[in-house]
Amino acid sequence: MKIAIYGPQYNDRSKSTIKTVSEYLQKTAATVLVESQFYNSILADSDLNLDAYGFTTFNTLDASFDLIISIGGDGTILRAITLVKDLGIPIVGINTGRLGFLATIRKDAINSALDQIFQGQYRISKRNVLTLSMDNSSTNFGLDFALNEIAVSRKNTTSMISIETWLDDEYLTSYWADGLIVSTPTGSTGYSLSCGGPVIMPESGSLVLTPIAPHNLNARPLVISANRTIKLRVSGRETEFLVSLDSRIKSLKSSTEITIKTAPYCINMIELQGGSFIETLRKKLLWGADQRN
């Protein structure tokens, strides 16, 4: 098995996790490569010697990898998928962050989780990805896809923006708001949820349009088919607005038309025993928990 390890800049909070993962993988027959910037930060800022485990480094991924392990929080997984892209490499996250909807493996459960992976005792949860294109070819995002959401929002102003919205070339409405979120089921527990959007099951084949602080009080989140093509055109008092793809942000000129579609590929998330989406909802959102008891 060929395994990639990805993480953010090293910090002391992740030291025990890196050590546990390294010691486990050293005992296997796996070929292990650590993302080069993460590898160098570990060597520079800790006393962990990854060379002693026989690990090497990588800068880019290819189809020869069987698994990528993300060490960090949900944001780390979102950055890791920019390396995975359309390669279909399964990804699993070890949570050294806070909430952890995507990075679900606890630090005290690393060995048992890796046991399950090496024994093949897991399922693949296929997560839809959104892609973005524009009528302005001079603007290049480079990485034009998002696992959680694509959002448009105001820039350099306290005034609301108008977001003309079409579904499959049929005019839907013009949102007068601070912005609009187009969320996948994976992102439905993130930014969209905090703006009043619904939680959507990963296998539902749906997207949700969630306005951000809309002035029209009857503007509510709308669940649509993932097969729909969404077109947006933003206007307002300022000459630019912001577009974010997960955590990546760029400025666009007003009246730029952007098109959002579901990508022809998915991100393959590994689900272990006790790590299903439903289980995560109960644990992370405290569903069914009664603080009085």
Image (cartoon, grey):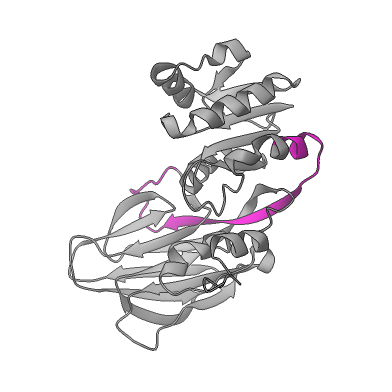
Q: Position of residue 33 (x, y in %)?
A: 60, 22
Q: Considering depth in this image, is 271 or 180 the residue closer to the camera?
A: 271
Give the image location of residue 279, x and y in percent.
66, 60
Q: Is residue 131 magenta-colored?
A: yes
Q: What is the quadrant of the C terminus in the image?
A: bottom right
Q: Which residues lie in the magenta part? A: 114-142
**Outermost residue, bottom side:** 218
User: What residue is drawn where x is 54% and y is 65%?
Assistant: 285
Which quadrant does the N terminus fall into?
Answer: top right
Residue 47 image offset from top left, x and y in percent: 46, 16
231 is within the stretch colored magenta: no
Residue lying furthest top in this view? 52
Which percent across, then down, holds residue 236? Answer: 22, 71
- Farthest residue to the front: give it: 293
Residue 149 seen in the current view: yes
Image quarter for residue 213? bottom left
Image quadrant of residue 8? top left
Q: Residue at x 70, y 26 (%)?
A: 2
| Residue 168 in sight | no
106 displayed left or right of 251: right
Answer left or right for 265 relative to 196: right
Relative height, residue 245 to residue 205 (above, below): above
User: As rendered, which of 226 and 20 lies closer to the eye?
Assistant: 20
Horizontal relation, residue 14 to residue 137: left or right: right
Residue at (43, 42) in percent of width and height: 142
Q: Is residue 248 above or below residue 191?
A: above
Q: Is 236 in front, or is 107?
A: 107
Count of marks, rendered view: 0
Residue in the picture at 50% in, 78% down: 222
